[in-house]
Amino acid sequence: MNNTKKIVFAVIVVAIIAMLFILNQEKAPVDKRKMVAVSTFSLYDITKHIAGDTLKIVNIIPFGVDAHSFEPTPKLMAEIERSALVIYSGAGLEPWTRGYEFKNKVIDMSKHVRIRELDADEHEHHTHHDEQCIHNKIDPHYWLDFANMEKATELVTQELIKLEPKNELMYIKNKEKYIKMLNSLNQAFSNTLKSCMLDTIIVNHNAFGYLSHRFGFHVESLSGLVPQAQPSAKDMSRVIQVIQEHDVPVVFAESFVSAKAMQSVADEAKVKVEVLQPLGNITADEAKKNLTYEDIMRENLQKIHKALMCR
């Protein structure tokens, strides 16, 4: 056998072996779990803690993407279509849901929790009025109220039990554990913020009204409810004046929003800039660290504690 024939023979043998190897490989197991699609991080956190690994949780808004401006891709919409249950935040937070006809069971969570209407001064204290602010006049960040999170947890548990009745006892047990965590968070905020020297925090956009109303401090925002809104010179001047009048030591920016305007305010007022997490979504880095709603809210608490100079 000459060299050419040997080479051809060797190639054929290798090809046959490779084909046999591929054919003998076990096919990747098909995930037969029912799918539940959720739109925001708080809903994802609840659903994941209740369901564990019994269901496939589809995170509609990928980690690291701003919830206010997100639009799902056709591939993601196909996953939503296949989901046995879709839970979205509502209250105007997800424009992509308007007019969309969901194939299976869908829940607008904002219809099952307490929604806060904006105070009159929350409209007057910023010169830029965004679409949400004018037309809805409601605050969509209801997950920053632990009582609302508890209501959402109860409803999610009920719906998951309907999907998988065999897991009812486990879901109820997980629900009780999650609600206990929420009660612990509520107590921690109440104890930590009950005696503070200051009463105002400065934030980029008006996302912390639920927290401030529940725990008795004031929020001054640079822009309205939409974080991408560009503040005017008058807005910036107003916030600088508040910082100086109240001796505020730190102002807060956000992960998904340019900190340029807030940094300019801080430089002018000679104060620090830190990040406060409104939890519409989490960053890719926070996701890698497997941070939960509880983890981030406790970090928020420590930052607010310092900003208000609490004892």
Image (tube, rainbow, N blue to C red):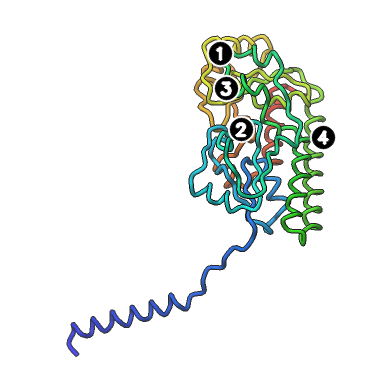
Task: Provide the secondary structure element on which disc 2 rests.
Answer: loop
- Residue type pointed to by label 4: Gln
* Viewer-closest of 7 and 98: 98
Seen in the image, is 164 located left or right of residue 98? right
Mark 1 or 2, nearer chain start: 2
Secondary structure under badge 3? helix
Which residue is denoted by mark 1 in the rendering?
236
Which structural element holds mark 1? Answer: helix
- Circle 3 is placed at which residue position? 131
Whether label 4 touches label 3, CB < 8 Å = no
**Crowd band around label 4 with a 10 angstrom C-alpha radius: few (<14), some (14–19), many (20+):** few
Q: Secondary structure at mark 4?
A: helix
Residue nearest the viewer, comparing 278 with 130: 130
Residue located at (63% from left, 33% from top): 277
The percent coordinates of residue 114 (x first, y second) are: 76, 31
N-term-proximal mark, 2 vs 3: 2
Side of 11 where 119 appears, left or right: right
Furthest residue in direction bottom, as rendered: 1
Instruction: Give percent across and percent down for residue 154.
Output: 78, 44
| Residue type at numbered disc 3 | Glu
Q: Amino acid at mark 2?
A: Leu
